[in-house]
Image (cartoon, rainbow, N blue to C red):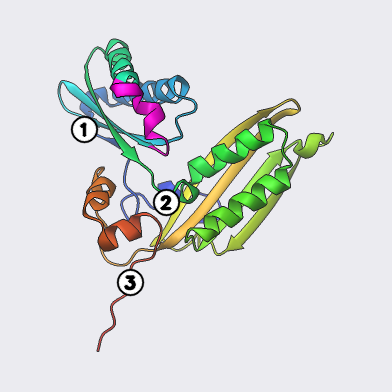
């Protein structure tokens, strides 16, 4: 089962938290659709912002967005101009008060979404797909990942027949629920058609109880120490019983 299912969905509530945090009640479908509109708008509005994910929290009259990005300067803009403009545009889109928080991703090589987008940009620039895959794998393993797998599907290298190629280094324990595995699907729009890019990154195993609240990573970033190391990919040190 672990080989087929989405690794993030399988681990929700165990080592992974939710990207939408609110109680919907009877309006659940409308709020979920609105979340999808917000995320689609943010990604389209800042295509070069290096945005990995958008966490959405709701109260009765306010929507709070936490944008995880590798390029906070692009998202915020000069003097906060871009983020203020985005806030006003989202207010018109949702007819609600919107608050935006920016969280910087220190190691983009450990984020599956950003690795996939980086490969997509290289493919669109007509760089060899094998070179792009191998460089991404080397960069991710260099910053402390325990394993990475990349799979490309489509007309690779402009071939007449579509095929798939996969490169892997380290280990990806898809059946282990305590394994912290990040997964993302990206697409590259090339002159030969769309190439699908799947990325799995194994950051280590999580022992004990993990804080799954939406701002857990931000709190760890401010405090530093073991929490920060574990969030960025280093495995938690296991205690020995004497």
Against 45, residue 160 (above or below) is below
The quarter in which the C terminus is drawn is: bottom left
Residue reaching furthest to the front? 78
Which residue bears the numbered disc 3? 237
Label 3 crowd bin: few (<14), some (14–19), many (20+), radius 10 Å: few
Residue 156 image position (x, y, % from top left): 76, 39
Residue in the image at 35% along x and 40% along y:
104
> From mark 2 to mark 1, how far is it between C-alphas?
21 Å
Residue 46 image position (x, y, % from top left): 44, 24
Q: Earlier in the sequence, mark 2 or mark 3?
A: 2
Residue in the image at 43% along x and 49% along y:
107
> From mark 2 to mark 3, how far is it between C-alphas?
24 Å
Against 5, residue 94 (above or below) is above
Label 2 crowd bin: few (<14), some (14–19), many (20+), radius 10 Å: some
Residue in the image at 72% along x and 38% along y:
127
The answer to whether mark 2 and mark 1 are in CB contact below 8 A is: no
Which residue bears the numbered disc 1? 23
Against 122, residue 240 (above or below) is below
Q: Nearer the viewer, residue 45 or 241?
A: 45
Residue reaching furthest to the right? 160
Q: Earlier in the sequence, mark 1 or mark 3?
A: 1
Q: Earlier in the sequence, mark 2 or mark 1?
A: 2
Residue 38 image position (x, y, % from top left): 36, 22
Residue 32 image position (x, y, % from top left): 33, 26
Is 234 on the left-hand or right-hand side of 159?
left
Task: State the extent of the magenta-drawn residues as a range.
Answer: 69-80
Q: Give the label on residue 10, or none.
A: 2
Question: Is the stretch drawn in magenta largely helix, strand or loop?
Answer: helix
Against 31, residue 21 (above or below) is below
Label 1 crowd bin: few (<14), some (14–19), many (20+), radius 10 Å: few
């Amino acid at each position: 089962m672990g080989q087929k299912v989405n690794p993030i969905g399988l681990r929700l509530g165990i080592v992974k938290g939710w990207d939408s945090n609110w109680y919907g009640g009877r309006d659940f479908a409308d709020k979920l659709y609105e979340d999808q509109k917000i995320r689609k708008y943010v990604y389209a509005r800042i295509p070069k912002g290096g945005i990995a994910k958008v966490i959405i929290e709701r109260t009765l009259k306010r929507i709070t967005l936490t944008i995880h990005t590798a390029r906070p300067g692009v998202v915020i803009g000069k003097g906060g101009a871009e983020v203020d403009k985005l806030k006003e545009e989202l207010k018109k889109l949702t007819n609600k008060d919107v608050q935006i928080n920016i969280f910087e991703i220190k190691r983009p090589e450990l984020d599956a979404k950003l690795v996939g987008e980086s490969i997509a940009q290289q493919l669109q620039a007509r760089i060899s797909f094998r070179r792009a895959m191998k460089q991404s794998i080397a960069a991710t393993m260099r910053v402390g990942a325990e394993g990475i797998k990349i799979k490309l599907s489509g007309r690779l290298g402009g071939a007449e027949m579509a095929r798939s190629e996969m490169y892997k280094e380290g280990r990806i324990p898809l059946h282990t629920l305590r394994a912290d595995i990040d997964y993302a699907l990206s697409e590259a729009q090339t002159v030969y058609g769309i190439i699908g890019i799947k990325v799995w990154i194994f950051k280590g195993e999580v022992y004990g109880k993990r804080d799954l609240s939406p701002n857990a990573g931000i709190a760890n970033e401010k405090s530093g120490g073991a929490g920060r190391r574990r969030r960025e990919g280093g495995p938690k040190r296991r205690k020995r019983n004497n």
